Image (cartoon, helix red, strand yellow):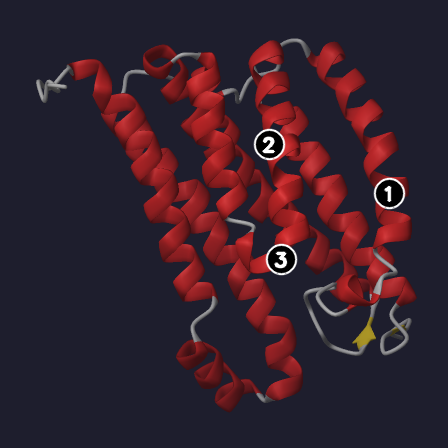
Amino acid sequence: MEYSFEWKSESLEPIVAIACTVIGFITYWFLAESKKLRAAMGKKYGEEKTMIYWVLFQKYTGFLFLGIIPTIVVLSLFPYSLGFYGMKFTNMLQSLYWILGLGAIVIPMNFFAARRPQTLAYYPQIRTKVWDTKLILLNGFTWVAYLFAYEFLFRGILLFLCVPTLGVWNAIAVNTAIYSCTHIPKGAAETIGAIPFGILICIITLMTGTFWVGFVVHAFLALSNDYVALYFNPETKIVRRK
């Protein structure tokens, strides 16, 4: 069987989208998991503060390499506005129905799942034992910033740049495959669960034309996981600072 290696200009968009996603995630991951950087932070701030600062650093690094840089790249290379990538306020009522429906499933599910020993061993990601209102709010803010960038990359840039050339189902397959692989470090359950979740969110994104459902539902998922685990973790406590 013979293959044609002729370059087609329409191939640039999915190639750039896939490259931004893969390179962005690889860069973020190796910085966020760098033992040298964490050791340097621990030496400067001490272990107690580093347990907080390191997770915040991870979230901000994700916001930069999964959100800011890919967005600059695609806006520089292609003649599309942010609205093309799903950052627009259309079909908001339809999106709200999806958000409420999926949220009604996700939050109760996490209420029970977050109490399992394997979940408590990973969540909340900030492993400090004492939490106050400031830390709870800061944790929530950084989660939201990170997930905004994450969802805009996957369900915005990657999905909408791949669909015109690859077609709907091929684009969803590529999107879900990469999305699932990013969950491998979190274990088999989250990696496998990311497949149906990823497919569903891609379909909803294309139906509504926006990435808001994926972003809000993903935020529900992450924050409820973190805070339910925080509440049920016997090694942590919430205090009120004066």
Front residue of 209 and 112: 112
Q: In the rendered view, would you say 225 is above or below 12?
A: below
Q: Disc 3 to disc 1, how far (Cα)?
A: 18 Å
Badge 3 or badge 1: first in the primary sequence: 1
Q: Which residue is mark 3?
A: 187
Label 1 or label 2, whichever comes before in sequence order:
1
**Residue, x 68% and y 38% (percent of image)?**
218
* Circle 3 or circle 1, nearest the eye: 3
* Amino acid marked by disc 3: Gly
Mark 2 lies on a secondary structure that is helix
Residue shown at 82%/32% (left/top)? 103
Residue 176 horizontal/vertical position (percent): 52, 32
Query: Which residue is labeled 1 in the image?
Result: 109
| Position of residue 149 in the picture relative to residue 200 (left or right) | left
Residue 113 at least partly seen: yes
Q: Find numbered disc 3 in the image and state the secondary structure of the residue it sits on.
A: loop
81 or 208: nearer the viewer: 208
Which kind of residue does numbered mark 2 sit on? Answer: Gly
Q: Residues within 10 Å of mark 1 (few under 14, many from 20)?
A: some
Which badge, 3 or 2, is on the more N-terminal residue? 3
Q: Is residue 242 left or right of residue 219?
A: right
Residue 156 as seen in the image, left or right of residue 73: right
Q: Secondary structure at mark 1?
A: helix
Q: CA distance from mark 3 to mark 2?
A: 16 Å
Judging by the rendered image, the residue that carries numbered circle 2 is 198
Residue 241, compared with residue 105, is above or below; it is below
Crowding at dot 2, Cα within 10 Å, few <14 / some 14-19 / many 20+, comes out as many
